[in-house]
Image: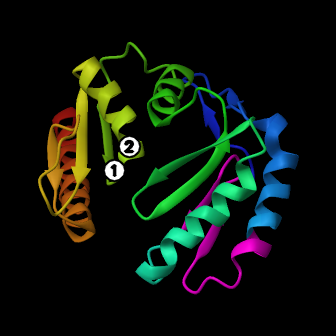
Amino acid sequence: MQPPKSRDKKGNEGAFQPAKLFLPAIQEISMELEHKIRETQGSKIEDNMFCISVHYRQVPPQDQGDLKEKVKSVVENRPEFRLTEGKMVIEVRPSIEWNKGDALNYLLHTLGFSNANDVLSLYIGDDQTDEDAFKVIAGKREGFPIVVSSIPKETKAWYSLRDPSEVLAFLLRLAKWNKSQASFLQLDYI
């Protein structure tokens, strides 16, 4: 897996690797987790390069507490790492101040859009970890922070969609609208 890369307005490539120094330890933790939870039915480990996600959506409810304890035991003697919990997932991540809001700000800045009027941010998320990005967009008052949830909940997002099928329908409509606008603009210049 390659580090995240982006290009600025001039086409220069950039890669941000705030956790690069942690990669060997992350791989070590990943192997230890594989060993510790391999017997836990329904568990899944996802290597996200700079963090590890342990999904337990398919784990029987009576085994979820045990799984969480196993994950905690792998990290408890590693102060350079912390655990965060999301929607049926525990993430092992380096103890650095970095979240999805920071990542969004970094991308906008790197791409030259941090103060641009020609970009409209659209952020769609369904997890507590997405709230930092919602907050960034809401703070700029330019863009659309959209939470995906079938039940009303407190959020920094201004808009909501009920489920992934509504997200797909929304994005398809947006793409169709964009295509019609592009056709309109092309005709306008003829």
Residue drawn at x 36%, y 52% as measured from the top left: 127
Residue drawn at x 19%, y 65% as measured from the top left: 166
Q: How is the image coloured?
A: rainbow
Which amino acid, by three-letter code, is at mark 1? Gly
Residue wearing tag 2: 130
Q: Position of residue 101 (x, y in %)?
A: 44, 30
Q: Are marks 1 and 2 in contact (CB under 8 Å)?
A: yes
Q: Position of residue 1 (x, y in %)?
A: 75, 56
Q: Is residue 152 above or below residue 135?
A: below
Q: Element at badge 1?
A: strand
Residue wearing tag 1: 125
Which amino acid, by three-letter code, is at mark 2? Asp
Q: Specify the quadrant of the image occupied by residue 155.
A: top left
Q: Magenta segment range? A: 34-55
**Residue sitting at the far top:** 115
Q: Position of residue 184 (x, y in %)?
A: 16, 44
